[in-house]
Amino acid sequence: MLGDTFTPITWEGYTPYNELPPRKPLPRRTEIDLAPILLDRLVGRYAVPGVVLKVTRQNGHLFLQENEEAPGQLFPEAELRFFSKTSDDVVTFE
């Protein structure tokens, strides 16, 4: 009788997830092979304002962990540039 009495999405002006436009596909990137010694020199802890990044190497692959989140694998695109296959993140070491 009263109809829809609980529509917080409408109240806040948000678009429901099932009505959002499709996301752009991730850019195509080319993974290269790097020698283990090149990966080893990148392992460590990095301080970025408001964030601590921990880079580790396991089984010939680099992993990046932000604060206490689960680590994600990085794939080499160049000697100092890495990318994620699950997001649009790109990490460049200087």
Image (cartoon, rainbow, N blue to C red):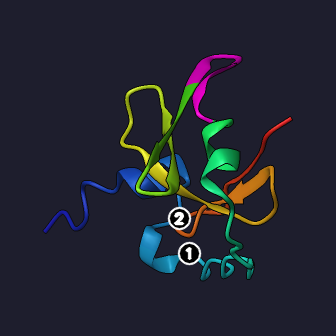
Question: Quadrant of the image for the C terminus?
Answer: top right
Q: Is there CB contact under 8 Å for labels 1 and 2? A: yes
Q: Picture coordinates of residue 19 (x, y %)?
A: 50, 78
Residue shown at the point (34%, 56%) measured from the top left: 7
Q: CA distance from mark 1 to mark 2?
A: 7 Å
Q: Quadrant of residue 3?
A: bottom left
The residue lying toward the viewer, choosing from 38 and 51, is 38
Horizontal and vertical percent position of residue 67: 46, 26
Label of residue 86 in the image: none
Q: For this view, does 74 lie left or right of residue 83?
A: left
For the record, the magenta segment spans: 43-52
- Of the residues shown, which amino acid type is indicated by label 1? Leu
Precedes in sequence: disc 1 or disc 2: 2
Name the residue at 58% across, 26% down. Answer: 44
Identity of the residue drawn at 66% across and 58% down: 35
Tell me the kind of residue under disc 2.
Thr
What is the secondary structure assignment of the residue under circle 1?
Answer: loop
Residue 91, position in %: x, y?
73, 48
- What residue is shown with label 2? 15
